[in-house]
């Protein structure tokens, strides 16, 4: 059942899951699933991924604010702070791959590693392996997986920013969260 709190800002309350959903699925536009299966091969694909993943923060803050619940707002602030703080090391970790490939295009980055395991960037030099490890840890934090699941904090904040959500809107938040996990994994695989 879809229940909207009485004191909630109804428009923002309804738009928040849609913003998070659109941002999470917008990342799939530039991910190359095969040499021919890519929605759009942008020449700034990696920059697009960093930018579109940042839009999730806006939806999370909208959800916390629109609920008119202090615990949901605290959860939103904690989640936004964690995502923002871990996007910086993730962005810096991506620079190693950009320098090795000489391109921001996800297709070009993937093509630069063709020819077997000895051509993969992760094994190319020690810096690329370290940057992969940094990206892995930062990606875990961005998608709120253990041990970085502090924003949900079930013991103190009930469920975080989506405390007041129920029904399909609640399901959309979790669908977007799991889509974001898949996108982060696909990005790590491509890079």
Image (cartoon, helix red, strand yellow):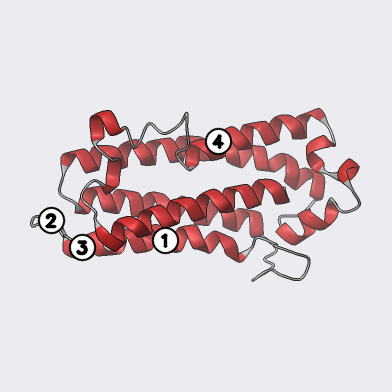
Q: Quadrant of residue 106?
A: bottom right
Q: Which residue is mark 4?
A: 138
Residue pictured at 64% horizontal, 63% vertical: 30
Q: Which residue is mark 1?
A: 21
Residue pictured at 9% horizontal, 55% vertical: 7
Q: Nearer the viewer, mark 4 or mark 2?
A: 2
Q: Are marks 4 and 2 in contact (CB under 8 Å)?
A: no
In the rendered image, the vertical position of residue 109 relative to residue 75, given as above or below = below
Q: Is disc 1 surrounded by few (<14), some (14 to 19) or many (20+) residues within 10 Å?
A: many
Q: Which residue is mark 3?
A: 2
Q: Marks 1 and 2, how far apart in space?
A: 21 Å
Residue pictured at 66% horizontal, 32% vertical: 133
Q: Is residue 53 visible?
A: no
Q: Earlier in the sequence, mark 4 or mark 2?
A: 2
Q: Secondary structure at mark 3?
A: loop
Query: Number of callouts in the render?
Result: 4
Q: Are marks 3 and 1 in contact (CB under 8 Å)?
A: no
Q: Secondary structure at mark 1?
A: helix
Q: Marks 4 and 1, how far apart in space?
A: 21 Å
């Amino acid at each position: 059942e879809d229940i909207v709190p009485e004191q909630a800002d109804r428009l923002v309350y309804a738009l928040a899951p849609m913003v998070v959903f659109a941002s999470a699925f917008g990342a799939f536009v530039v991910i190359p699933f095969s040499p021919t299966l890519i929605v759009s091969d942008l020449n700034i694909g990696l920059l697009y991924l960093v930018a579109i993943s940042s839009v999730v923060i806006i939806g999370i803050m909208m959800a916390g604010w629109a609920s008119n619940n202090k615990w949901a707002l605290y959860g939103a602030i904690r989640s936004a702070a964690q995502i923002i703080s871990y996007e910086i090391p993730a962005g810096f970790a991506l620079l190693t791959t950009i320098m090795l490939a000489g391109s921001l295009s996800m297709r070009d980055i993937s093509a630069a590693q063709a020819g077997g395991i000895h051509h993969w960037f992760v094994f190319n030099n020690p810096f690329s392996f370290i940057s992969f490890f940094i990206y892995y840890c930062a990606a875990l934090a961005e998608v709120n997986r253990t041990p970085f699941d502090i924003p949900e904090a079930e013991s103190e904040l009930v469920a975080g920013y989506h405390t007041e959500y129920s029904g399909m809107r609640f399901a959309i938040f979790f669908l977007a969260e799991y889509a974001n996990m898949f996108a982060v994994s696909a990005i790590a695989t491509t890079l």
